[in-house]
Amino acid sequence: MLSKDIAHFSEMRYEIRAYLCFLMQRNIKNHLPHIELNKIVDGIKKIEKEVGIFELIYVLDSSGSLVIDGISRDSNIECKKGENHNERAYFYRAVKEKKCILTDPYPSLASGNLVITVSYPLYNDKGDLAYVVCMDVRLERSLELVRTTPLFGFSFGIGKCVYFLMALSLFLVCSLLLIKGSISLWDALYRFGSLEILDIKDVFEATILITLSLAIFDLVRAIFEEEVLGRQKSQDSKVVHKTMTRFLGSIVIALAIESLMLVFKFAITAPEKLLYAVYLIVAVTFLLAGLALYVRLTANLKRD
């Protein structure tokens, strides 16, 4: 699926760029007194033999015009000498940044396929731009550059299955907690409607169970969206921090309610055990302080 290929490319972008730029730099010499076109073509042929997944290789001069016909294994793809590409991102970005660059996925005008382009600017010993060597690779095939073994795809699929089973199991736990909490709440409302004595324990129990169910549901949603559906993990970690904060916050709330319930229970039935409730309150206080510290530190990291 195209959306998954884009998400996987985003995750592996730096590895793909590092490998493709390494190929360019190893096979095509830069910053020489005289940069000869035939030497560049020889380097391209070496790259062609080493990496057979490219779609099109072409060379632009300092003005962005093709100096040779594009090299492709697909006879239907044409890229003729003399065409000008100086308005394309792969040309002006490489010239502006003066280094090997990798573009985002875009539809190729030559083939219509979604491709990425690695561009390698060549300079003479005086620092003047001579050529820009470009190589188009289809998006789905670019992922093969970092999947070095057949076991990669197998293990990747196994990992998705494991995450799916874990998310399903946690969802079942979440559902059971929600059902149990709803039953406790219904019993409390039924007694109140029947003019019976309202058992505050049922209300506390329902609140704790529903709060824990909400916390687990947030965790299940994060696991399912990121690991099973393969949506891109936020590089700024906003989603991760938000999920973790809500999960820990729900746990703290549940424990705080439990400690409050114990205070009422021990105060009435067993005052000598009231100290244990105090211990739990102190523990909740430490957890709340830890959560506040976590939120503060993650906020500082995002600003940096």
Image (spheres, rainbow, N blue to C red):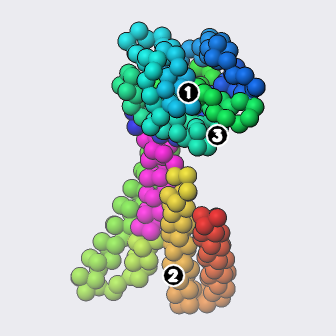
Q: Is residue 161 left or right of residue 152?
A: left
Q: Position of residue 181 (x, y in %)?
A: 39, 67
For label 1, the residue is 61
Q: Which residue is mark 2?
A: 261
Crowdedness near tag 1: few (<14), some (14–19) or many (≥20) residues, C-alpha within 10 Å: many
Q: Earlier in the sequence, mark 2 or mark 3?
A: 3
Image quadrant in which you'd find residue 127: top right
Q: Which residue is painted at 63% across and 80% down in the image?
A: 285
How far is mark 2 from mark 3, CA to CA? 66 Å
Q: Of 5 and 42, which appears nearest the observer?
A: 42
Q: Quadrant of the image for the C terminus?
A: bottom right
Residue 88 pos. (x, y %): 45, 36
The rendered magenta stretch, by its main secondary structure, is classed as: helix
Q: Closer to the camera, 226 or 2?
A: 2
Span shown in magenta: 210-233
> In the image, residue 235 lies at what x, y percent?
55, 52
- Report how far apart the C-alphas of labels 1 and 3 lie in the structure: 14 Å
**Which amino acid is tagged 2?**
Met
Residue type of the residue flagged with mark 3: Lys
Residue located beneath label 3 in the image = 98
- Of the numbered discs 1 and 3, the one sitting upstream in the chain is 1
The structure residue drawn at horizontal position 41% and vertical position 82%, both measured from the top left corner, is 200
Q: Nearer the viewer, mark 2 or mark 1?
A: 1
**Viewer-nearest of labels 1 and 3?**
1
Q: Secondary structure at mark 1?
A: strand
Q: Nearer the viewer, residue 30 or 176?
A: 30
